Image (spheres, rainbow, N blue to C red):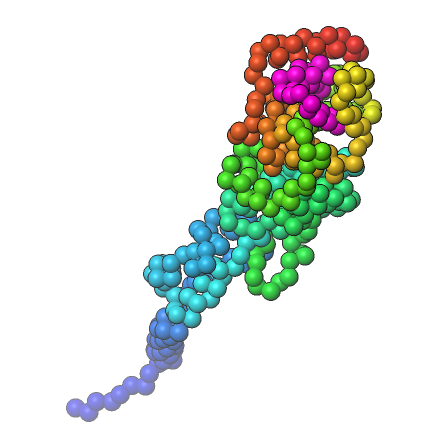
Amino acid sequence: MAVVSRPIQPRQQQQQQNRSKLTMALVIIFSFFILRSIFSGSDYNDGVDINSNVGQLLNEPNINSSSGGINDKDKAKETGTTNTVKKIDTKKQQLKSKIFNRVPPHSKGKSGIVIQEQLMCHAYAWHRGAKYGGACGPGETDDHRSLLEAIGLEVELPFACPSDTPRDGEYRTSLIPRDKYATDDTRIWIPEYLDYLRSKVKYPPKEPNKFTIAVHIKRGPVNPCSTRRDGYSRYLPNSHYQRLIDQYMQPDARVAIFSQASSYEKFDEFQARGYELHLDHPITEVWQTIVTADVVILSRSSFGLIPSLVTNGTVVYTPFWHKPIRGWTVVRDQEILDALDKDLAAMNKTCK
């Protein structure tokens, strides 16, 4: 019996063609994945950009370590990197960190506040083994610079922005928001940091060479009726300063009082005692006297607080919103504190 082959119907022919196309597509896709696995390398991300945000920058362990911070072998195990990529990673890890803070414009007479912000960010960088790049922001900085130059800290505390750092691959820069470096307030200035800061200070010669009590009295717009801050009066009466001077007075001592001509109280009583009275005195000389004084009596102000960080004398601190530094003498005599409250209450009666 003869077998006669029947021609393939159009529908069957179409099905065979579709199966062939599907098979070819699967072969191509499978081949693509095989080639990709061979040649694509790892999914390694080669580090944080030089202008990365602070969260990325400061969470990297030992970011400024000369060894690169992260062990190369461990890094290779984690990422499966090749030798070439490991070298790139090590180079990135060796980049030094330079930290900046933003300072809003301040009017003349606010140097204490501006430099306090600088020192907090400077300490923040020091704690992380980073370099402080400077304070960035608009406004006049001549008075601030002159104060820093007066005690030799102009190099440690410059005024600069991240854009002023050369893009030579040596530093990665970060502009730190205030809530990062100011959270701890004065507690960020630990003794070890202050030892470092003092090593950078250029102490002027003490003139005259005698036991000196330096007193900073905040006046100007501050008076007994000023708004309180954190429950503290911004104003300290003359009587309070006099009680503290009496505690530290020595025969033939020099008492130098620095304040402002615009004052709620007159300073006649201090002059009558033979004290030096310096009103609206050049601010550079105020700081130079404070850093060389044997005793410094503080007001409730950042202006006197800053040079007191590096003085080698006794610092007498009346409690206020900025906490004392370890080693300062805190006024705890209840008789003196009660007298202060009584004097302020009497003055407050004049407020409208």
Relative to residue 189, is residue 140 drawn left or right?
Answer: right
Quadrant of res 301? top right
What percent of the width, then of the height, locates residue 181?
57, 40
Between 219 and 117, the residue placed more toward the observer is 219
What percent of the width, then of the height, locates residue 338?
62, 9
Rendered residue at 74%/37% (across/down): 285
- The quarter of the rendered structure image containing the C terminus is top right
Quadrant of res 278? top right
Magenta-span inclusion, residue 255: yes
Rendered residue at 21%/89% (across/down): 3
Task: Please say whether residue 347 is visible from this viewpoint.
Answer: yes
What percent of the width, then of the height, locates residue 42?
40, 66
Segment colored magenta: 232-259
User: Which residue of the protein is positioned furthest toward the bottom in this rendering?
Assistant: 2
Magenta-span inclusion, residue 282: no
Measured along the vertical axis of the image, is residue 126 above or below residue 31? above
Task: Please say whether residue 179 is visible from this viewpoint.
Answer: no
Between 51 and 71, the residue placed more toward the observer is 71
Measured along the vertical axis of the image, is residue 202 above or below residue 291? below
Relative to residue 126, is residue 31 drawn left or right?
Answer: left
- The quarter of the rendered structure image containing the N terminus is bottom left
Relative to residue 81, is residue 228 drawn left or right?
Answer: right
